[in-house]
Image (cartoon, helix red, strand yellow):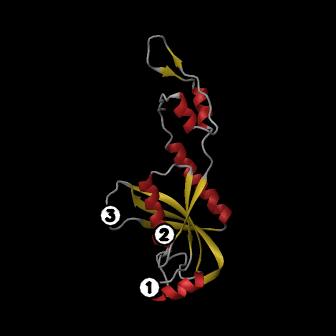
Amino acid sequence: HFLQCAVGYATARSDCKKDTLHKSALFPHKDQELRFGLGQVEASFAGGFFPFLPAVNYHSQMSSGEDLVEQLLHVYQKRQAHEEPSNLRLEVLPEATFHDMYVGEWSQVPIHFCEGECLGYVPEQTISHAKSLRPSAEALVFIHGFNCDLATALGRVAQTFSLGNMPPHIVPFVFSYAGGAELTYFQARARFA
């Protein structure tokens, strides 16, 4: 009932060093450089409540944003290939409904029926072509609010992905900033407004 979700992050927080993603300083400060990393977050996909989840069990620093994007795409392309359905589903729609639903690009796939059968057959090469028309990768960028450390933000995104049944072509990403804590609300608000 658990899964490991890779979530990319970028931060310039001075209170959140590479070994302490769960730390948050009372007074917000930022570093001079933007740091990138990839967090592996364990989350529940069963919908049950577990007090120890979500949890960032492992993370690695990346040397650049390009390296981070490359690594995330690699992880999610493997996931997309692994989750590829072995069976395809065919639905018959009225002509008007079909044209209302699919106004963009679509491909025609010939289905062959043997006389007297309700089972249709599709050539394997046609399915390979249809699979190659997958959507390109998209990013979901999460920017947390006040009083949130990086580990908590990574966990929220991972939990959203695990329970939200996100398509595998969407890649999660967190931008984290030093948002302060309870006693510095007005200072943080004035600084980041």
The percent coordinates of residue 31 (x first, y second) are: 62, 82
Query: What amino acid does circle 3 point to?
Result: Phe
Question: Residue sitting at 48 percent across and 58 percent down?
Answer: 5
Mark 1 lies on a secondary structure that is: helix
How much space separates mark 1 and mark 2, taking CA atoms? 17 Å
**Residue 118, located in which quarter of the rendered image?**
top left
What residue would you read off at disc 2? 153
Category of crowding for the residue at label 2, using alpha-carbon neighbours closer than 10 angstroms: few (below 14), some (14–19), many (at least 20): many
Mark 1 and mark 2 residues within 8 Å of each other at the beta carbon: no
Which tag is nearer the camera, tag 3 or tag 2? 2
Marked residue nearer the N-terminal end (3 or 2): 3
Marked residue nearer the N-terminal end (1 or 3): 3
Mark 2 lies on a secondary structure that is: helix
How much space separates mark 1 and mark 3, taking CA atoms? 26 Å
Q: Nearer the viewer, residue 75 or 102?
A: 102
Q: Nearer the viewer, residue 23 or 138?
A: 138
Mark 3 lies on a secondary structure that is: loop
Please determine whether, in this image, residue 75 is positioned above or below residue 86.
below
| The C terminus sits in image quarter | bottom right
Q: Nearer the viewer, residue 192 or 27?
A: 192
Mark 3 and mark 2 residues within 8 Å of each other at the beta carbon: no
Which tag is nearer the camera, tag 1 or tag 3? 1
Marked residue nearer the N-terminal end (1 or 2): 2
What residue would you read off at disc 3? 50
| The N terminus sits in image quarter | bottom left
What residue would you read off at disc 1? 182
